[in-house]
Image (cartoon, rainbow, N blue to C red):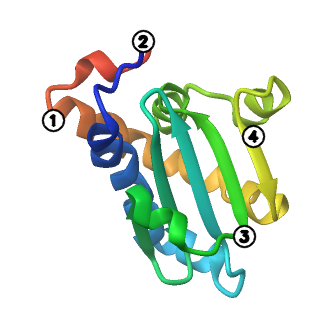
Amino acid sequence: MSAFKDADEVYEYIGKMFETATQTPSFVEATEGTNLVVLLKQTSPDATMLIDFPKQTVVTGDAALEGKHTVQLRMSSDNANKFWQGKLNFTLAMAQRKVKLDGKRSTALKLLPLTEDLFETYRQRLKESGREDLLVA
């Protein structure tokens, strides 16, 4: 059973982190000229997001499926929660097929080191929202 009760919760927490990332100067600089658009499909609960780094936007729900993407990322919502807390080794999760990445992989993988600066922001959001139950030990 997932720690998130529904897709709206996934969008509230995971989606907000991608919104933060698209506005963070280091991400903006790293994705400039790359046309990196990620279609993120999560399970348990099902949630879909289109993260458009050049446009600095995140589209959620069915509307996300209408956009064109250069990378498709698939994982469970629980693994996305672990990732944003710095508790999921992305490369190992890919090797174990817990995370699937298709498309322009090299561009997307270059962003991994930049996410570390956002882990504390995510954990703080969970605490401020009273969602300590989502924190991973």
Tell which circle, 3 or 1, labels the residue nearer the N-terminal end: 3
Which element is circle 1 on? helix
Tell which circle, 1 or 4, labels the residue nearer the N-terminal end: 4
Give the quarter of the image for residue 132. Answer: top left
Q: Residue at x 55, y 25 (%)?
A: 87
Q: Which residue is mark 4?
A: 100
Asked if disc 1 and disc 2 are in contact, CB closer than 8 Å, the reply is no
Position of 74 with respect to 6 (left or right) is right
Disc number lying in front (3 or 1): 3
Tell which circle, 1 or 2, labels the residue nearer the N-terminal end: 2
Q: Residue at x 66, y 70 (%)?
A: 69
Query: Residue 88 placed where, x, y %?
Result: 61, 28
Q: Which residue is mark 1?
A: 128
Q: Residue at x 25, y 40 (%)?
A: 125
Q: Residue at x 48, y 51 (%)?
A: 48
Q: Is residue 129 above or below residue 58?
A: above
The type of residue carrying mark 1 is: Glu
Q: Which residue is mark 2?
A: 1
- Toward the viewer: 130 or 97? 97
